[in-house]
Amino acid sequence: MEDKSSDPKGQEKTSQGIEESLETKVSPEQPRKKKRKSTVEDLKKRLEDQKHLAQDNYEKFLRAYADLENYKKRVEKERADTLKYGNEELMRDLLPFMDNLERAIEHASSEINNNPRALIEGVQLTLKDLRTALEKHGLKAIESVGKPFDPSLHEAMMQVESEAHDPQIVVEEFQKGYLIRDRLLRPARVSVAATREVSEEAETGEDEG
Protein backbone atom coordinates (compact mmCIF):
# COMPACT_ATOMS: atom_id res chain seq x y z
CA MET A 1 0.00 0.00 0.00
CA GLU A 2 1.42 3.36 -1.07
CA ASP A 3 2.15 5.91 1.68
CA LYS A 4 0.58 9.24 0.56
CA SER A 5 2.08 11.17 3.41
CA SER A 6 5.52 10.83 1.95
CA ASP A 7 4.33 12.06 -1.43
CA PRO A 8 5.21 15.79 -1.87
CA LYS A 9 2.39 16.27 -4.38
CA GLY A 10 -0.06 14.77 -1.95
CA GLN A 11 1.11 17.09 0.79
CA GLU A 12 0.76 20.08 -1.54
CA LYS A 13 -2.78 19.10 -2.38
CA THR A 14 -3.61 18.70 1.28
CA SER A 15 -2.26 22.17 2.28
CA GLN A 16 -4.05 23.73 -0.68
CA GLY A 17 -7.29 22.16 0.44
CA ILE A 18 -6.81 23.53 3.97
CA GLU A 19 -6.20 27.06 2.65
CA GLU A 20 -9.29 26.88 0.43
CA SER A 21 -11.27 25.69 3.42
CA LEU A 22 -10.00 28.64 5.52
CA GLU A 23 -10.78 31.10 2.74
CA THR A 24 -14.27 29.70 2.51
CA LYS A 25 -14.80 30.22 6.23
CA VAL A 26 -13.33 33.77 6.32
CA SER A 27 -14.86 35.29 3.17
CA PRO A 28 -18.54 35.62 4.35
CA GLU A 29 -17.48 37.91 7.23
CA GLN A 30 -16.02 40.55 4.94
CA PRO A 31 -19.34 41.70 3.38
CA ARG A 32 -20.91 41.61 6.86
CA LYS A 33 -18.26 44.00 8.16
CA LYS A 34 -18.85 46.31 5.20
CA LYS A 35 -22.59 46.18 5.79
CA ARG A 36 -22.13 46.89 9.49
CA LYS A 37 -19.89 49.87 8.69
CA SER A 38 -22.41 51.19 6.20
CA THR A 39 -25.23 50.91 8.78
CA VAL A 40 -23.21 52.87 11.37
CA GLU A 41 -22.51 55.61 8.83
CA ASP A 42 -26.23 55.80 7.97
CA LEU A 43 -27.13 56.06 11.65
CA LYS A 44 -24.57 58.83 12.16
CA LYS A 45 -25.97 60.73 9.18
CA ARG A 46 -29.55 60.31 10.39
CA LEU A 47 -28.53 61.43 13.86
CA GLU A 48 -26.84 64.49 12.42
CA ASP A 49 -29.96 65.30 10.36
CA GLN A 50 -32.14 64.98 13.45
CA LYS A 51 -29.82 67.33 15.35
CA HIS A 52 -30.18 69.95 12.61
CA LEU A 53 -33.96 69.46 12.57
CA ALA A 54 -34.15 69.80 16.35
CA GLN A 55 -32.07 72.99 16.21
CA ASP A 56 -34.33 74.45 13.50
CA ASN A 57 -37.44 73.58 15.52
CA TYR A 58 -35.95 75.13 18.65
CA GLU A 59 -35.18 78.36 16.81
CA LYS A 60 -38.73 78.42 15.42
CA PHE A 61 -40.05 77.92 18.94
CA LEU A 62 -37.97 80.83 20.25
CA ARG A 63 -39.25 83.11 17.47
CA ALA A 64 -42.85 82.04 18.06
CA TYR A 65 -42.47 82.58 21.80
CA ALA A 66 -41.00 86.04 21.25
CA ASP A 67 -43.87 86.93 18.88
CA LEU A 68 -46.40 85.71 21.46
CA GLU A 69 -44.83 87.78 24.22
CA ASN A 70 -44.84 90.87 22.00
CA TYR A 71 -48.48 90.24 21.09
CA LYS A 72 -49.44 89.89 24.77
CA LYS A 73 -47.68 93.16 25.60
CA ARG A 74 -49.38 94.92 22.69
CA VAL A 75 -52.83 93.63 23.69
CA GLU A 76 -52.26 94.62 27.31
CA LYS A 77 -51.26 98.13 26.25
CA GLU A 78 -54.30 98.43 23.98
CA ARG A 79 -56.55 97.24 26.81
CA ALA A 80 -55.02 99.78 29.20
CA ASP A 81 -55.44 102.55 26.62
CA THR A 82 -59.05 101.51 26.05
CA LEU A 83 -59.80 101.71 29.77
CA LYS A 84 -58.00 105.03 30.05
CA TYR A 85 -59.22 106.72 26.88
CA GLY A 86 -62.34 104.70 26.03
CA ASN A 87 -64.64 107.71 26.54
CA GLU A 88 -62.57 110.04 24.35
CA GLU A 89 -65.04 110.04 21.45
CA LEU A 90 -68.00 110.58 23.79
CA MET A 91 -66.26 113.45 25.55
CA ARG A 92 -65.43 115.06 22.21
CA ASP A 93 -69.10 114.85 21.17
CA LEU A 94 -70.24 116.41 24.46
CA LEU A 95 -67.97 119.44 24.28
CA PRO A 96 -70.25 121.44 21.91
CA PHE A 97 -73.14 121.14 24.37
CA MET A 98 -71.00 122.49 27.18
CA ASP A 99 -70.11 125.39 24.91
CA ASN A 100 -73.79 126.03 24.11
CA LEU A 101 -74.84 125.91 27.77
CA GLU A 102 -72.04 128.29 28.73
CA ARG A 103 -73.15 130.71 26.01
CA ALA A 104 -76.78 130.41 27.15
CA ILE A 105 -75.84 131.23 30.73
CA GLU A 106 -73.70 134.13 29.60
CA HIS A 107 -76.50 135.40 27.36
CA ALA A 108 -79.12 135.11 30.12
CA SER A 109 -76.82 136.89 32.58
CA SER A 110 -76.60 139.90 30.31
CA GLU A 111 -79.00 142.66 31.32
CA ILE A 112 -79.29 143.85 27.73
CA ASN A 113 -80.26 140.49 26.27
CA ASN A 114 -82.19 139.17 29.23
CA ASN A 115 -84.84 137.07 27.45
CA PRO A 116 -86.07 134.06 29.47
CA ARG A 117 -87.99 132.61 26.53
CA ALA A 118 -84.91 132.62 24.30
CA LEU A 119 -82.95 130.97 27.12
CA ILE A 120 -85.54 128.23 27.47
CA GLU A 121 -85.61 127.59 23.74
CA GLY A 122 -81.80 127.47 23.62
CA VAL A 123 -81.63 124.97 26.48
CA GLN A 124 -84.35 122.81 24.91
CA LEU A 125 -82.46 122.77 21.60
CA THR A 126 -79.21 121.90 23.38
CA LEU A 127 -80.93 119.10 25.30
CA LYS A 128 -82.35 117.69 22.07
CA ASP A 129 -78.95 117.69 20.39
CA LEU A 130 -77.37 116.18 23.51
CA ARG A 131 -79.87 113.32 23.50
CA THR A 132 -79.15 112.69 19.82
CA ALA A 133 -75.40 112.57 20.49
CA LEU A 134 -75.81 110.14 23.39
CA GLU A 135 -78.09 107.91 21.32
CA LYS A 136 -75.28 107.68 18.78
CA HIS A 137 -73.18 106.12 21.54
CA GLY A 138 -75.86 103.56 22.43
CA LEU A 139 -77.98 105.43 24.97
CA LYS A 140 -81.67 104.60 24.80
CA ALA A 141 -84.44 106.00 26.99
CA ILE A 142 -86.83 103.55 28.65
CA GLU A 143 -90.47 104.15 27.80
CA SER A 144 -92.35 103.77 31.06
CA VAL A 145 -95.69 105.60 31.33
CA GLY A 146 -98.57 103.38 30.18
CA LYS A 147 -96.31 100.32 29.98
CA PRO A 148 -96.55 97.21 32.20
CA PHE A 149 -94.30 97.39 35.24
CA ASP A 150 -91.05 95.52 34.59
CA PRO A 151 -88.80 95.03 37.65
CA SER A 152 -85.80 94.64 35.36
CA LEU A 153 -86.39 98.16 33.98
CA HIS A 154 -88.44 100.00 36.59
CA GLU A 155 -88.06 100.86 40.25
CA ALA A 156 -91.48 101.23 41.90
CA MET A 157 -91.52 104.23 44.25
CA MET A 158 -95.20 103.91 45.14
CA GLN A 159 -98.50 102.26 44.18
CA VAL A 160 -101.53 104.39 43.37
CA GLU A 161 -105.16 103.61 42.67
CA SER A 162 -106.03 104.62 39.12
CA GLU A 163 -109.27 103.96 37.29
CA ALA A 164 -107.59 104.99 34.03
CA HIS A 165 -104.96 102.24 34.25
CA ASP A 166 -105.01 98.50 34.67
CA PRO A 167 -103.17 97.04 37.66
CA GLN A 168 -99.36 96.90 37.38
CA ILE A 169 -99.30 99.62 34.72
CA VAL A 170 -96.86 102.50 35.15
CA VAL A 171 -98.84 105.63 35.95
CA GLU A 172 -96.16 108.27 36.42
CA GLU A 173 -92.42 108.59 35.86
CA PHE A 174 -90.38 110.41 38.50
CA GLN A 175 -86.99 109.84 36.93
CA LYS A 176 -86.30 108.62 33.40
CA GLY A 177 -84.46 105.33 32.99
CA TYR A 178 -81.89 104.52 30.33
CA LEU A 179 -80.32 101.56 28.57
CA ILE A 180 -76.88 101.49 27.04
CA ARG A 181 -77.58 99.30 24.05
CA ASP A 182 -79.16 96.21 25.66
CA ARG A 183 -77.80 96.71 29.19
CA LEU A 184 -79.61 98.61 31.93
CA LEU A 185 -77.80 101.83 32.77
CA ARG A 186 -80.33 103.27 35.21
CA PRO A 187 -83.85 102.03 36.10
CA ALA A 188 -86.78 104.36 35.72
CA ARG A 189 -88.35 105.47 39.01
CA VAL A 190 -92.10 105.19 38.64
CA SER A 191 -95.45 104.88 40.34
CA VAL A 192 -97.54 101.81 39.53
CA ALA A 193 -101.30 101.33 39.36
CA ALA A 194 -102.47 99.06 42.17
CA THR A 195 -105.48 96.77 42.36
CA ARG A 196 -108.41 98.03 44.41
CA GLU A 197 -107.70 95.37 47.05
CA VAL A 198 -104.14 96.64 47.51
CA SER A 199 -105.37 100.22 47.78
CA GLU A 200 -107.99 99.24 50.35
CA GLU A 201 -105.38 97.35 52.39
CA ALA A 202 -103.13 100.40 52.29
CA GLU A 203 -105.98 102.66 53.45
CA THR A 204 -106.89 100.19 56.23
CA GLY A 205 -103.31 100.15 57.42
CA GLU A 206 -103.26 103.95 57.54
CA ASP A 207 -106.52 104.05 59.50
CA GLU A 208 -105.22 101.52 62.00
CA GLY A 209 -102.05 103.51 62.42
Image (cartoon, helix red, strand yellow):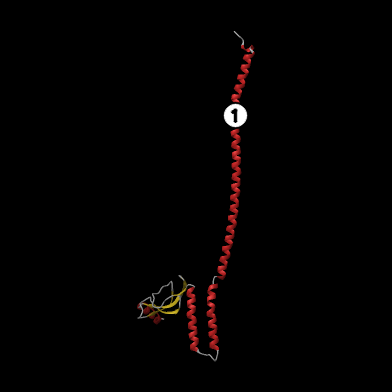
Horizontal arrangement in the rendering, residue 106 relative to residue 177 (left or right)? right
Kindly indicate the quadrant of the structure image that contains residue 191. Answer: bottom left
Q: Residue at x 57, y 65 (%)?
A: 78
Q: Residue at x 53, y 82 (%)?
A: 100
**Pick the front one: 124 or 52:** 52
Q: Label 1 belongs to which residue?
A: 29
Where is residue 146 shown, x and y percent of the image? 38, 78
**Pick the front one: 95 or 181:** 95
Horizontal arrangement in the rendering, residue 62 relative to residue 159 (left or right)? right
Where is residue 51 shown, x and y percent of the image? 61, 45
Q: Is residue 30 above or below residue 81?
A: above
For the residue marked with disc 1, what is the amino acid?
A: Glu
Horizontal arrangement in the rendering, residue 170 relative to residue 78 (left or right)? left
Helix, strand or loop at mark 1: helix
Where is residue 140 shown, x and y percent of the image? 45, 74
Quadrant of the snapshot with the C terminus: bottom left
Q: Residue at x 55, y 88 (%)?
A: 109
Neighbour tally class for label 1: few under 14, some 14-19, many 20 plus, Cα within 10 Å:
few
